[in-house]
Every structure is written in C-alpha cells, then in structure tokens.
Amino acid sequence: MQNDVQEILYTEKQIQDKVKEMGDMISRDFEGRNPLVICVLKGAFIFMSDLVKNISIPLELDFMAVSSYGHSTKSSGVVKIIKDLDIPVEGRHILIVEDIIDSGLTLSYLIDVLERRNALSITVAALFDKPARRTADLDADYKGFVIPDAFVVGYGLDYAEKYRNLPYIGILKPEIYST
Ligand code: XMP
Ligand code: MG
C-alpha cells in the first residue's frame, strides 16, 4: 500500500467487478441508442477506460475537462470548462462518466451545459457517490459505491495531481492535506 494512504476502501478486484456490473446494465439500457459517452477528465479516465470495455453495444466517446477544485479538497463551486467536446451533443443520448459526485456542483453545471446544447437525453454513471456534502439536488443513474465523507484517491482520483495511478481506491492520510 502507498505510504500516504491510510486505508484501502475498495480493492482493484472489487472495483473491476462493480464496473463490469455497471457496463452490463448500460449495455442493456442503451441498446439501439448509440450513446455519446462523455468522460469528465481527469478523474474519470481510468473508470471510463474500464467501463467502455464492459459495454457491448456501439457507442461513441468524447472527453471534457472541467476544473472546480484546484489543489484544495473542497469544491469552490466555480466550474470552468478547460477542454470542450469535439462531437456535437445535439439530438444525442448522452452518458456522462464521472469519477465521484461530492457536492454535485460539477455535475449540475455539466448537465445544464448539455441541456442547453439540446441533448436528447442525459444519463449519469458515477463510480463513487459521497452524499454527505451534497448541495445540488441530483443523483447518478448508475452508481458504483456510496462512500463516507473522506478524501479518497486512486483509480484516477488525485490529490494535487498525485495518486491517480493507484489501482485501488484509498483514504488519504489527513496529515497529507492538512499541512
Ligand atoms: P463536486 O463537489 O462538484 O465534485 O460534486 C466533483 C469533483 O470533485 C472531485 N472530488 C474528489 N477528488 N477525491 C478526489 O480525488 C475525493 O474524495 C473527491 N471528492 C470530490 C472530483 O474530481 C469530482 O469530479
Ligand atoms: Mg480532481
């Protein structure tokens, strides 16, 4: 285990099993709809990669980068598009792939943007849900794990751009970000 990690919440195997389940459900539900799957960078990049390998129907994918946190562990509430989509969303069934929903501000902003661009439908797959600090009134359609109010890293998630490469998800030692 990485030295800065206090506890492993979910192992690589537990995550893989869950992602396969989510992929199976999405394959069934989106049959015949050719969804446009949107990865919210950077945190969702590993989840996106594993998830689409478990989706058996035709789809297209694209990437969007937003920033809300900077190097803090709390959302600033201000969301900025750093990299926009290449593929038009008008008339498309959209599946947003998010790493984690915390306050929900990032996601509600994204949904708003995609609605204004006339998406036909918007569905959300989030690997982790941290409901404790939710301020926006929303929920994921496909949810991996509900987790406690702790700052987690690994499997794409970072603290100050570190730990994204850990294959598991773990709770960071508080002294790492409180100093
Ligand atoms: P909001 O608050 O807008 O936050 O729902 C969503 C984004 O915040 C990041 N986030 C985290 N990143 N460990 C992380 O590495 C966490 O525990 C955590 N909580 C929120 C994440 O980028 C997510 O997309
Ligand atoms: Mg982040």
Image (tube, rainbow, N blue to C red):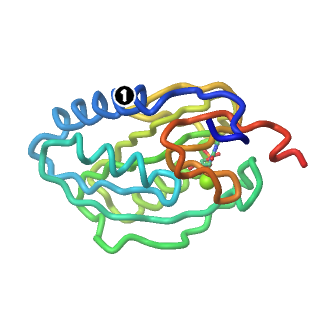
Q: In which quarter of the image is residue 116?
A: bottom left
What amino acid is at disc 1?
Lys
Determine whether the residue tagged by mark 1 lies in a helix, strand or loop. Answer: helix
Answer left or right for 131 relative to 71: left
Residue drawn 51% across the image and 50% down it: 156
Where is mark 1, residue-wise? 18
Vertical side of 114 occupied by 14: above or below: above
Tell me residue 5's x, y (percent): 69, 37
* 1 to the left or right of 115: right
Query: Residue 123: x and y, percent?
Result: 35, 43
Query: Residue at position x 55%, y 55% from top?
Result: 109
Q: Badge 1 local density, few (<14 within 10 Å), some, or many (20+)?
A: some
Q: Can residue 108 be seen in this view?
A: no
Q: In this figure, what is the number of numbered marks? A: 1
Viewer-proximal residue among 167 and 1: 1
Q: Residue 52, image x and y in percent? A: 26, 48
Location of the N terminus (image quadrant) = top right
* Residue 176, quarter of the rendered image: top right
- Is there any visible trace of residue 48 in the rendered image? yes
Q: Residue at x 28, y 60 (%)?
A: 61
Work out whether 123 lies above or below 120.
above
Considering depth in this image, is 111 or 116 the residue closer to the camera? Answer: 111
Measured from the top left, where is residue 65 in percent x and y? 50, 65
At x 21% / y 31%, what residue is drawn?
24
Q: Nearer the viewer, residue 114 or 38?
A: 38
Residue furthest to the right: 179
Q: Which residue lies furthest to the left in this view?
A: 32
Q: Is residue 8 above or below residue 106?
A: above
